[in-house]
Amino acid sequence: MAYETLIVETRGNVGLVTLNRPQALNALNSTVLKELKEAYAAFHADEAVGAIVLTGSERAFAAGADIKEMQPLQFADIYKSDFISGWDEVAKARKPVIAAVSGFALGGGCELAMMCDFIIASETAKFGQPEITLGVIPGMGGSQRLTRAVGKAKAMDLILTGRMMDAAEAERSGLVSRVVAPDRLLDEALAAAEKIASLSRPSVMMAKEAVNRAFETTLEEGLRFERRLFHSLFATDDQKEGMAAFVEKRKPAFTHR
Ligand code: CO8
């Protein structure tokens, strides 16, 4: 399939999506959303793909929602069409998605990175929620996901002032899982994704579900949910294979069943 705003390819067992609107620092518009949903759907349908990496350019992961597309919008229209709600589908990807962030991840760009399961950042990455400087607030989940990721103090600081934080501050505050040299970014993200793709898909997908549940429920309910998923994995061939391989001191050959 031909994409206008993305480069979509497969590397081994990893789906790689590169945001590709260099003229607008990868600003997110309705075409990006439509194409991203299509690319994710294709990767979900592809049995060979076990994980996805989402990246941008060296200069920008994404500098936000497309301000030029949003500028003329009126309240009644965006309320009726529930503008932005389409992005919920991107956040609900069932296979793991790693964001590989270099340069600007601002506004909707930071929010898109936070929709991924974890963020690997280049030393050049800059994160921020500058919507307040435009007379609005984050609209793709920033006030909720950033607060859960970094806590109230840092989230308030970033969202109320609109300032950017660099990769070191983002790692210190728990927004990103690793910071790497710029020329290592894609290799590091692809290697992490390939490692995930080599593991048993049902256990990987359930691990993702279990961690995400921690953000939505009480500890007691979360523990119950985790335990039920854990029990259910004993119905898979891969649990038998994984544990047999350990005991027999060999590599497991997972069939993802
Ligand atoms: N939207 C549209 N175009 C953009 C955006 C953007 N978010 N960001 C950059 N561009 C364009 C610029 O207009 C410029 O285009 P042109 O050459 O035609 O003038 C080109 O990209 C290069 O940008 P700059 O010349 O500004 O580059 P600088 O290196 O000087 O500055 C910055 C880089 C600091 C990143 C600067 O471009 C900037 O501040 N960008 C806007 C950042 C921002 O405010 N983002 C938040 C947007 S609001 C938002 O995301 C709300 C999310 C919820 C709604 C989601 C619905 C999809």
Image: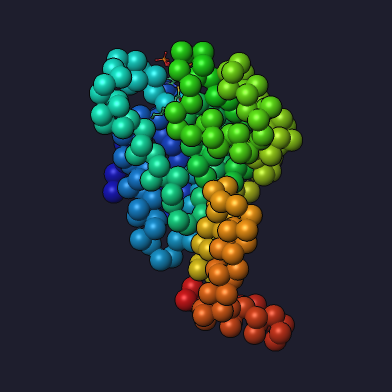
Tell whether 49 sits left or right of 252: left
Position of residue 238 measured from the top left corner of the image (x, y, whole percent): 55, 77
Q: In this view, does 70 lie above or below 222?
A: above
Q: Which residue is drawn at 67% across and 44% down?
A: 177
Q: Residue at x 43, y 65 (%)?
A: 48
Position of residue 255 measured from the top left corner of the image (x, y, whole percent): 49, 76
Q: Residue at x 54, y 43 (%)?
A: 99
**Whether residue 15 is visible:** no
Instruction: Identify the image quadrant of residue 154.
Output: top right
Tell whether 107 sits left or right of 247: left
Position of residue 14 measured from the top left corner of the image (x, y, whole percent): 49, 56
Viewer-closest of 234 and 220: 220
Q: Residue at x 49, y 73 (%)?
A: 256
Q: Is residue 52 above or below residue 150?
A: below
Q: How is the image coloured?
A: rainbow
Viewer-closest of 197 and 67: 67
- Counting the numbered discs, the total is 0
**Whether residue 244 is visible:** yes
Position of residue 117 measured from the top left corner of the image (x, y, whole percent): 55, 48
Q: Is residue 199 above or below residue 218?
A: below
Instruction: Identify the image quadrant of residue 234.
Output: bottom right
